[in-house]
Amino acid sequence: MAKVENLTQKILDDAKQRADEILREHEEKRRQVIDRKNRELEEELNRIGRSAENEAARSRERVLSNARLTTRNEELTIRQEKMDEAFQKAKEKLSDMPNAEFKTFVENTLKKLGDAGAQAILVPENRKQALGDKVAGIPVETDPGSADGFSIRSERVFLNYRFDSLVDSMREEMEQDIRASLFEKEA
C-alpha cells in the first residue's frame, strides 16, 4: 500500500508541478500579450499625437496665412484709397489753378500743338473771362458741359484737355512713381 500511496503522491506531485508549469507559461504568455498590446497602444497613441500635432500645425499655418492675406488686402485697399485721394487732390489743384496760370497753360498747350487747324477753344464759363475772346488768334467759347480745363475743336478733331480726363489718362503712367513717393517710408 505504501507503494500505491507513494505512486499516487508522485502522480499528484507531478500533476501539481505540471499545473504550476502550465500556469507559469500562461502567465508568461498573458504578460507578453499585455506588453505587446501596451506597445501597440503606445504606438497608436504616438501616431495619433503626431497626426494631431501635424493637423494643428497645418491649421495654425492656414490661420496665419489667412491673417497675412487679409492684412495684405487691407493694406492694398488703404494704399489704393491713398492713391485715389492723391489723384483727386491733383484734379482739385488743377481746377483751383489761378486764372493767370490757366491762361499760360492754354497758351503753352496751343504752342506745342502748332497749327492744328483749331476753330475754337471751349472753356467752362468761369474761365472765359480769364482767356478773353481769343487766345493765339483762336476764338474762345464757353462749354456748359465742362467743369474744368478746356477743349479744342477743329474740323476733324476734338482735343480734350479737361483736367479730369488729363489726370485719368496720365494716371497709369504716374501710379508707379506716386506709389513709390507715397509709400517709400513704409518700405
Image (cartoon, rainbow, N blue to C red):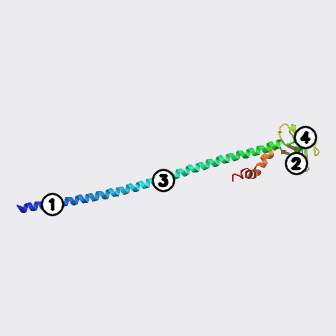
Residue contact between numbered discs 2 and 3, judged by CB atoms under 8 Å: no
Q: Is residue 51 visible?
A: yes
Please name the residue that numbered disc 1 is placed on: 13
Question: Tag 4 or tag 1, which sits nearer the N-term?
Answer: 1
Question: Tag 2 or tag 4, which sits nearer the N-term?
Answer: 2
Crowd around label 3: few <14 · some 14–19 · many ≥20 (10 Å) = few
Query: Label for residue 53?
Result: 3
- Furthest residue to the left? 1
Query: Label for residue 109?
Result: 2
| Quarter of the picture holding the N terminus | bottom left
Image quarter of residue 6? bottom left
- CA distance for labels 2 and 3: 69 Å
**Disc 4 marks which amino acid?**
Ala
Residue in the foreground of this view, choosing between 64 and 161 = 64
The x, y position of residue 115, in whole percent, is 91, 49
**Disc 2 marks which amino acid?**
Thr
Crowd around label 1: few <14 · some 14–19 · many ≥20 (10 Å) = few
Q: Residue at x 46, y 53 (%)?
A: 51
Tell me the SS state at disc 1: helix
- CA distance for labels 3 and 1: 59 Å
Residue in the foreground of this view, choosing between 46 and 164 = 46
Q: Residue at x 6, y 62 (%)?
A: 2
- CA distance for labels 4 and 2: 16 Å
**Disc 1 marks which amino acid?**
Asp
Mark toward the viewer: 4 or 2 = 4
Residue contact between numbered discs 1 and 4, judged by CB atoms under 8 Å: no
Query: Label for residue 130?
Result: 4
The x, y position of residue 172, in whole percent, is 75, 50
- CA distance for labels 4 and 3: 76 Å
The x, y position of residue 166, in whole percent, is 81, 46
